[in-house]
Image: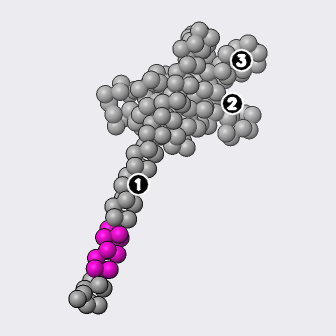
Amino acid sequence: MVDLAEIQAAYYMVAATGVIVAAIYYVMTLRTAQRNSEATLETRQAQLFMGFYDKFTSIEGAESLLAIQEWKVESLDDFMEMWNNREKNRIWGSIFMVFESIGVLVHEGLIEVRIVARYLGMYRFIWEKWGPYVKQARELRNRPRMYIEAEYLYDRLIEFGRINKEYGII
């Protein structure tokens, strides 16, 4: 005959096995969720990257980028003249708003600066040309956030380039 102690022991074994199975299932579920989360992050970063890649590789984007690189700017007056020229402002703004947007994405951790650096290392030269005048215009117009994220993008790219020389940013 089976005594009460054997029944209790069997009951505890079944209960313990259930707890172990539940714990294993929980760990496996967490690992799957983590992998899915990492895949989602990678997909989101790829989508964001392709969005600004499309902007710069479109005919209009490429022409605008080339134009702002060719324009002569040697003073705040030159910059303000460009700023007040409707057509030039539209071209310049269309490019710098993309840099501003990318700066926001980097600042918010939605895209890694490493990904941006692979494609936009040349942004260093663009900001170094225009940035001093943006800063002066920011003060002149009392607009402290004017292209502040574009400046943030530059700062992060330079910081990244100092550490990762192989990217050729610095």
**Amino acid type, callout 2:** Ala
Position of 67 relative to 102 (above/below) = above
Contact flag, marks 2 and 1 (Cβ < 8 Å)? no
Instruction: Measure the alpha-carbon separation of dots 2 and 3.
Output: 17 Å
Q: Which residue is mark 1?
A: 29
Judged from the image, the secondary structure of the residue bearing numbered disc 1 is helix
> Viewer-proximal residue, 169 or 37?
37
Front of the two marks 2 and 1: 1
| Quarter assignment of residue 166 | top left
Name the disc covering residue 90, or none: 3
The span shown in magenta is 10-20
Q: Residue at x 36, y 35 (%)?
A: 162
Could you tell which of marks 2 and 1 lies nearer the N-terminus?
Answer: 1
- Asked if disc 2 and disc 3 are in contact, CB closer than 8 Å, the reply is no
Of badges 2 and 3, nearer the viewer stands: 3
Q: Amino acid at mark 3?
A: Arg
